[in-house]
Image (spheres, rainbow, N blue to C red):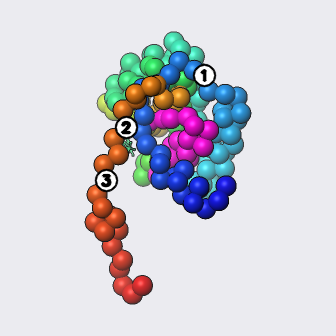
């Protein structure tokens, strides 16, 4: 892949919440797993785990937990990130990095995705559904699948000059 192609791939990632009834191909799944494994993380402590869910019943149940992850119900697969560092800001940062990489790896295969954040009791509910131990933090889920026809995409952004300012000499 050339640099412009790589940049186009990264830049064009957008959230999709409506999915076609089509499974994730095995190669795409394996590639996503490989990317997760190599995700950069705090001090390389690797205190994270991703639960991959294709089971329809479990996806429905996860979608029913408290939060903003209802779109898991229609996804071909869901990824739930569990972390267990003592400082929650480290958990949150690792989660963000892993989530973005999962989404980009999926995108490289033409697979769409959206983050779904659990809130309130949602994290504990998800832990229970997934049989995770008490010390795990669960907050970030990702819905994945091929985009449904006519799936909505929001692509508004502030101009570059507002988002990025050159500080000091350049
Ligand atoms: C930290 C974070 C949490 C998010 N939580 C949710 C969420 O709970 N539910 C959801 O549908 N989208 C969620 N999103 C997706 C954003 O709504 C989406 O990225 C944003 O609207 C920009 O849309 P775009 O990526 O398609 O340009 C989240 C994104 C981030 C970065």
Residue 127 x %, y %:
48, 26
Q: Which element type, helix, strand or loop, lies under badge 1?
A: loop
Q: Is residue 122 visible?
A: no
Say if disc 2 is inside 8 Å of ligand 1: yes
Say if disc 3 is inside 8 Å of ligand 1: yes
The N terminus lies in which quarter of the figure?
Answer: bottom right
Marking on residue 23: 1
**What secondary structure is the stretch in magenta mostly built from?**
helix
Q: Which residue in the structure is indicated by mark 2? A: 153
Q: Which element type, helix, strand or loop, lies under badge 2?
A: loop
**Where is 31 relative to 150, above or below?**
below
Rounded to the nearest angstrom, the CA distance separating label 2 from label 1 is 21 Å
Asked if residue 118 lies in the magenta stretch, the reply is no
Residue 117 x %, y %:
38, 35
Q: Which residue in the structure is indicated by mark 3? A: 157
Q: Along the line of sight, which residue is nearer the eye, 38 or 102? A: 102
Residue stretch rendered in magenta on the structure: 93-114
Residue 99 x %, y %:
51, 43
Are the residues at dot 2 and dot 1 in contact (C-beta closer than 8 Å)? no
Q: Is residue 113 visible?
A: yes
Q: Along the line of sight, which residue is nearer the eye, 114 or 131? A: 114
Q: Along the line of sight, which residue is nearer the eye, 18 or 139? A: 18
């Amino acid at each position: 892949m050339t640099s412009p192609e790589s940049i186009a791939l990264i830049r064009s990632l957008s959230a999709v919440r409506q999915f076609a009834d089509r499974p994730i191909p095995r190669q795409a799944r394996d590639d996503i797993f490989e990317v997760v494994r190599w995700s950069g993380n705090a001090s390389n402590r690797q205190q994270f785990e991703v639960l991959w869910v294709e089971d329809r019943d479990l996806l429905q149940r996860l979608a029913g937990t408290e939060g903003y992850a209802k779109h898991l119900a229609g996804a071909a697969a869901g990824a739930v990130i569990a972390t267990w560092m003592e400082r929650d800001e480290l958990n949150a940062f690792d989660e963000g990095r892993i989530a973005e990489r999962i989404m980009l790896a999926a995108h490289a295969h033409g697979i769409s995705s959206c983050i779904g954040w659990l809130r309130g009791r949602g994290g504990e509910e998800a832990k229970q559904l997934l049989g995770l131990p008490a010390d795990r933090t669960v907050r970030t889920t990702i819905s994945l699948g091929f985009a449904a026809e006519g799936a909505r995409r929001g692509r508004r952004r502030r101009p570059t000059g507002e988002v990025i300012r050159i500080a000091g000499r350049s």
